[in-house]
Image: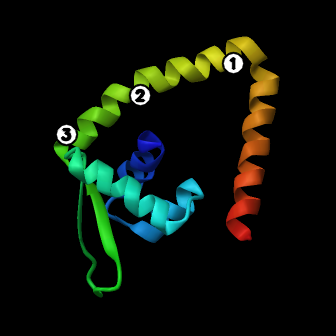
Amino acid sequence: NQLAVLWPIVALEPTPMSEIARSVVMDKTTVSRSVAGLVDAGLVEVRPGDDGRHRLVSTTARGRHAFGVAMPAWEAAQEEVVRVFGKARFTSLVRETRKLAKSVAAS
């Protein structure tokens, strides 16, 4: 869960909580709790946005390092799923998961 929340922060930083929630298809309350855990771990920092309505989240040096360290394990897990299910089935599962996430996000 933390890696899923950290991923869009790394990709979009600084990014508002609402964009993180949209990216990971979670409600804002769940994202806020996850981000609070990342703040406590020293992986991200939160600051007010320019208009005061949004809080912007950015990674710290420690967060960028942790993300980089996590990537080989994530990639190995992806490769294992491809090995078990086969490339075509894996691709299909990813496509269907994305459709499901978009459907959930739209509702």
Q: Which mark is residue 82?
A: 1
The picture quadrant where one finds residue 62 is: top left
Residue 21, how many percent across, how many down? 51, 62
Between the residue at mark 2 and the residue at mark 3, the CA separation in whole angstroms equals 14 Å
Crowd tier of the residue under label 1, counting other residues whose Cα lies within 10 Å: few below 14, some 14–19, many 20 or above: some
Whether residue 96 is visible here, answered yes or no, is: yes
Pointer 3 residue: 62
Is 105 positioned to the left or the right of 20 in the image? right
Kindly identify the amino acid type of the residue bearing the numbered disc 2.
Met
Residue 64, how many percent across, how many down? 27, 40
Whether residue 86 is visible here, answered yes or no, is: no
Pointer 2 residue: 71
Between the residue at mark 3 and the residue at mark 1, the CA separation in whole angstroms equals 31 Å
32, 52: nearer the viewer: 32
12, 63: nearer the viewer: 63
How many numbered marks appear? 3
Crowd tier of the residue under label 3, counting other residues whose Cα lies within 10 Å: few below 14, some 14–19, many 20 or above: few
- Name the residue at 24% across, 45% down: 43
- Name the residue at 75% across, 31% down: 91
Residue found farthest to the top: 83
The picture quadrant where one finds residue 9 is: bottom left
